[in-house]
Amino acid sequence: MRRAFIPAAAAAFTLLAAAGAGAAPAAPSPAPKAAPSTPAPAGPSDPIVADVHCVLIGASMASSSDAQAQPMGNATTFFYLGRLQGRISDAQLEEKMFAELPKLKDVGQSEAHRCLDSVASRGNAFQTIGDHLEKRLSALPASQRPTGAPPAAAAPPAATPPKN
C-alpha cells in the first residue's frame, strides 16, 4: 500500500525542524514594491535544487498547524513536485531533499517568497486562461460547445419602445 502524502510532508517537516529551521514559514504577506533597480531574490543557481527547496518549504507549510498556510503549502508542494517529475528520479529527489534540509535554515523568508510567488503567478495565469476559454466557449453555437462548457452568453434584452 502506498503511503499518503501528508505523512511524507510531516516527515519532511520533522527533519526540517530537527535541522534547526524552526517552524514552518508563514504564508508571506504582500511585500512592498522594491525599487526597479533591485533584482528579485534569487534562489539556488541549480534549478533542481531551487525546486527541491520549494518542495520542502511547501511540505513544511502543508504540515504546519496554521490552517491558512496548509492549502498553499499543498499547492506549492505539488506544483514543484510536478516541475521535478521527469527531471530527476524519485531516489534522486529523496537524496536531494535529505541533502538540502539542513541548508534551509539559512535561506530565510526570501526563499519562501520566491516559491510562493511563482505558484501564485502560475495560478493567476491559469485563471486568466480559464476566463478567456470560458468567453470563447460561450460564444460558440450550442452545437459546437463541448459537453460541460458554459452556456452561451445571454443576449442583451431587447429595447422596449417607450409607452406614451
Image (spheres, rainbow, N blue to C red):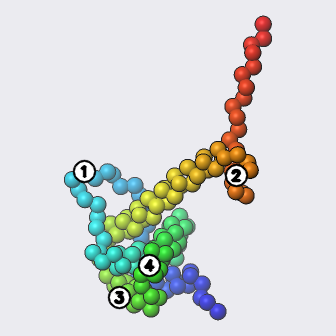
Front tag of 3 and 4: 4
Closer to the camera in the image, 67 or 146: 146
Distance between the alpha carbons at the discs numbered 3 and 2: 53 Å
Distance between the alpha carbons at the discs numbered 3 and 4: 16 Å
Mark before the other along the chain sequence, 3 or 2: 3
> What residue appears at the point 64 percent right and 50 percent down from the top-left corner?
137
Answer whether labels 3 and 4 touch (C-beta < 8 Å): no
**SS for tag 2?**
helix
Residue type, numbered disc 3: Ala
Q: Mark 3 = which residue? A: 99
Crowdedness of circle 3 by 10 Å Cα count: few (<14), some, many (20+)? Answer: few
Q: Mark 2 = which residue? A: 144
Circle number at residue 36:
1
Q: Is 60 placed above or below 26 here?
A: below
Distance between the alpha carbons at the discs numbered 4 and 1: 31 Å
Q: Mark 4 = which residue? A: 84
Q: Position of residue 53 (x, y in %)?
A: 38, 77
Q: Position of residue 73 (x, y in %)?
A: 49, 70
**SS for tag 4?**
helix
Mark before the other along the chain sequence, 2 or 1: 1
Residue type, numbered disc 4: Leu
> What residue appears at the point 78 percent right and 11 percent down from the top-left corner?
163
Mark before the other along the chain sequence, 1 or 3: 1
Distance between the alpha carbons at the discs numbered 1 and 3: 35 Å
Residue type, numbered disc 2: Gln
